[in-house]
Image (cartoon, rainbow, N blue to C red):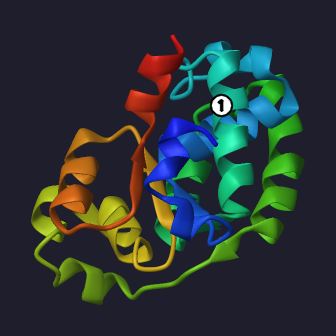
Amino acid sequence: MSWWLSGLERWRGQGAALDTELLLMRLVGSLNPDLIQRFKHASRFIPDDFNLLSRIVAAFGRIITNPTVLSEVSNWIDHHKASDVRVRLMPAWSRSIALFDEKYRESARLAGMDQFQMLGLADTSLFEVSREAVVVTRDGGLVARLAAARRPHLDFRKVQSVRR
């Protein structure tokens, strides 16, 4: 068993909720991991990060997401309107969305939560999803809020640092 899974064993098979940045990296890497560093908003990652994230998702069984994260990923893809990568990415994005387990929370409800002031809408929606799945993120603010609330999460930065 991987060290990062040891504290989250009871969540195995329950799903992983990826933040926007990681979901985009996974999508781009699914086309070709070598494209990751050429794609804005995913360029901080390397192909090995895609392989690591794929192992994490496999351990938790499926990807759980929500409309706010999906919208952010779509907006980031739109930054590449004139790109041949975008042309190849959109059909893959469409197929991926159909496979995700999408959880909906009303934006007004999320905006009324204490976390909203610090996290914003997308990360507050991930905070809520953490009731049902492990949140995988590189966002330090989200990690801190999840840890303080004792919610299941995996700080991708820590997993990366051990591997590198």
Helix, strand or loop for disc 1 = helix
Regarding residue 32, the answer to whether it shows in the image is yes
Residue pointed to by mark 1: 52
For the residue pair 37 and 46, the one nearer the viewer reads as 46
The residue located at (10%, 75%) in the rendering is: 114
For the residue pair 109 and 22, the one nearer the viewer reads as 22
105 vs 91, left or right, is left
Q: Residues within 10 Å of mark 1 (few under 14, many from 20)?
A: some
Residue 98, given in percent of the width and then of the height, sits at 82, 70
Quarter occupied by residue 127: bottom left
The residue located at (65%, 31%) in the rendering is: 52
Regarding residue 77, the answer to whether it shows in the image is no
Residue 44, given in percent of the width and then of the height, sits at 49, 18
Quarter occupied by residue 36: top right
For the residue pair 94 and 84, the one nearer the viewer reads as 94
100 vs 19, left or right, is right
The residue located at (56%, 81%) in the rendering is: 103
Circle 1: residue type: Leu
Task: Count how many numbered circles sit on residues in the image.
Answer: 1
Position of the N terminus, as image quadrant, is: top right
The residue located at (45%, 58%) in the rendering is: 135
Residue 136, given in percent of the width and then of the height, sits at 47, 50
Q: Is residue 71 above or below residue 25?
A: below
